[in-house]
Structure formats: C-alpha cells, structure tokens
Amino acid sequence: DDLLILGKVDLIVTGSTSVKGDGIVQVGNTTVTDASFNLYTPGNVTLADKGGKNQHKFPVAMSIYGTAPSGSSQTITIANGEEFHGTIYAPNAKLQLKSGGDVFGAVIANTVTLSNKSVLHYDTQLETSASSSDTTRLSGWTELTAAPGSGHAFARDNRAPFDTLF
C-alpha cells in the first residue's frame, strides 16, 4: 500500500519496517514541498523496488534513525533499483545497498555494504540546509581499497577494531 506524507511526520516503529513491491512511502507531492518524514526504529528496515520516494529529492526531508542499542542486530536494506533521497543515522546498524539500491544524501552506520551496482552519493545540499548548522559535515573522503599489510597508501588497517570490520 501507499503512505503519502503531506506534513511533518515522525513515525516510531518498535518492530521491523518493510516497503517493497508496489508499496510506496512518498514524501510530498507536486503542490506540497515542505513535507518531511522521520522514521525511528530499532528494527530492521527494508526499502525495495519503489520503497521510499522523496518527491522533491531534498535529503533533509526524509530520514531513517536506527535506534538499536550497541551490541544488538539491526539491518537497513535499500535494494532493487530503489533511490533513497535522505539521511540515515544508524550508528549500530548494518546498511546494505543491493541490486542498484542507491542513497543520495548522507549515512552514518556501523557497516556499509554496496553490491550489484549500488552507489552512495553524498548530497552537498546537506551542507547548506537549515538543519545542518549544528551537525557533522563531510570534509573529505578517502576510500581504503588495498588489502591490509600491502604497504599501499590506501591499504585498510588490520589493527583492532578494524580487523573485525573488513
């Protein structure tokens, strides 16, 4: 089914959330440009196929907050060609981008896995948004692609805690 957000909505879900197939969570429409949607959950989240549509593609208008405590298991999956325009703040969760699932915005997660042509795009609109005045901003990015111990300048670190992450 469809969920159309035409105002400022905070949704707290204590279990898991799944939107896939023909289901849509749509934020805004052609006449409503100031709608926003925040999902707070300690459960797993799956957005696939049409999933979550941020009509105006402003990343500050749609956010997922993973509230799972440290040491617990939470997975956020964006898959099957879904484009998520928003932010994800889930410091204890695994984020999985699968089968062309893309994020346009910003992400904070415990681990991020990209597979099958999925892409993570940092959206510079976040730097100038009204809500970003007191937030952390990306100032640089270096992808560590070489194997640990290879001596390459972009080698991943194999010391704790990185030895368990890679």
Image (cartoon, rainbow, N blue to C red):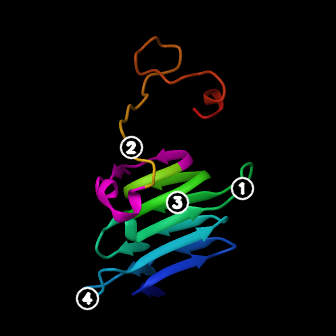
Residue 31: image tag = 4
Give the CA distance from mark 4 to mark 2. 32 Å
Give the CA distance from mark 4 to mark 3. 30 Å
Q: Which residue is mark 1?
A: 69
Residue at the image point whose x is 54% and y is 22% from the top: 157
Q: Are marks 3 and 1 in contact (CB under 8 Å)?
A: no
Residue 77: image tag = 3
Q: Position of residue 29 (x, y in %)?
A: 30, 85
Which amino acid, by three-letter code, is at mark 3? Thr
Secondary structure, mark 2, is loop
Residue 51 forms part of the magenta stretch = no
Q: Are marks 4 and 3 in contact (CB under 8 Å)?
A: no
Q: Nearer the viewer, mark 4 or mark 2?
A: 2
Q: Which residue is mark 2?
A: 138
Residue 3: image tag = none
Q: Is residue 135 visible?
A: yes
Q: Position of residue 66 (x, y in %)?
A: 60, 61
Q: If you read the primary sequence from the N terminus, does the residue marked by circle 4 or circle 2 appear first?
A: 4
Give the CA distance from mark 1 to mark 2. 25 Å
Q: Are marks 2 and 3 in contact (CB under 8 Å)?
A: no
Q: Are marks 1 and 4 in contact (CB under 8 Å)?
A: no
